[in-house]
Amino acid sequence: MYPEQRKHKHLFVLMALIPFALVGCEAPLNLESVDKETSQPVRRTDQLQAIASNDQVMIVVGNNGLVLTTAKGELQWQRHQLISQPNLIDVESCPDQSFIALSFEKQIWRTNDNGQQWQMINLGTQENMLDLACASDGSYWVAGSFSSILSSHDGGESWKESSFNEDAMLTSIQFVTNQVAYATGEFGMVVRSDDAGASWKLLEPLPNEFYPQATLFKSNEEGWVVGLDGVVMHTSNAGKSWQVQPTPVAAPLYGLHLGKAGLYALGENATVLQEKNGRWVSVTSPSVSAYLRAAETVGDQLLVAGGNGTLLALNSKKNSNSE
């Protein structure tokens, strides 16, 4: 099971960053359609990867340096493109209202003006990084290959790199409180810090070496992981044990979001699921052929983002399908 899971994870990240090519067989070029497409803030070639917000704006990031910004609650998107066109795979807001984004090119990008201008910071690591977090003290944390965790306490000026010396990809890192943090990854790896990241300890691995595509802890004790085949696992005892929760899909799940209306999982084929008393039910959404990877709550709406320029606002109060 491990080789297929590992191959799927790396292929997903790489393929999600490759724009689609539209090729016609001797068909005339429709310049009007091209102009209309390129004038839109969100385009079919966009592969959207992550969403974050502060008190003023929301930011969505994606391939080829794409940054979309909107005033919070308005959903009137402005399109920006970072000059070196890095492939952005994550974005987070920090306590000081700034944002940091992670690129596949081993860079951190930082903005202090709500996404208008960005500063690039090289991570200076040989490892591939997949996820980042901004802790409550403003420190930056990045997790990735060879079970590596990078941290900076001076705004990215210097970095400390540590590893569990396991050839495993860490796919998620999250600070639940100012002291408690979790990271998860390949071979079912789960690690926890109780001292603001100063030290980390290995917990019991996820059952069957489950490869988590995304992880979200609601509290120090309760959390979820999602991955291939529509699998969701839940812990209520800080990762000491995990139980599979039933879902109505077999599609890979790539993201988790906790909003005012509850907990959501996102995945392939525009899958949106909502947790209901330990079960997961499908949320009605438009039928589009694209992955979904990120979400943000906007009033009574759930904004979801993914491949092929998919950026949809769903009614979070609307009843889910009971399946």
Image: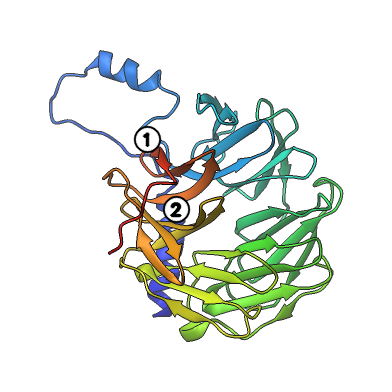
Q: Amino acid at mark 2?
A: Leu
**Residue, disc 1:** 45
Q: Mark 2 or 1 closer to N-term? A: 2
Vertical placement of residue 280 versus 119, above or below: below
Quadrant in which residue 309 is drawn: top left
**Residue, disc 2:** 14
What percent of the width, then of the height, locates residue 222?
Answer: 62, 72
Residue at the spot 71% in from the left edge and 62% down from the top edge: 176
State the residue lying farthest toward the top: 32
Residue at the spot 36% in from the left edge and 69% down from the top edge: 247
What percent of the width, then of the height, locates residue 37?
Answer: 34, 22
Q: Secondary structure at mark 1?
A: loop
Q: Which label number is shown at residue 137?
A: none
Q: Amino acid at mark 1?
A: Thr
Toward the viewer: 180 or 111?
180
Horizontal side of 258 relative to 284 (left or right) equals right
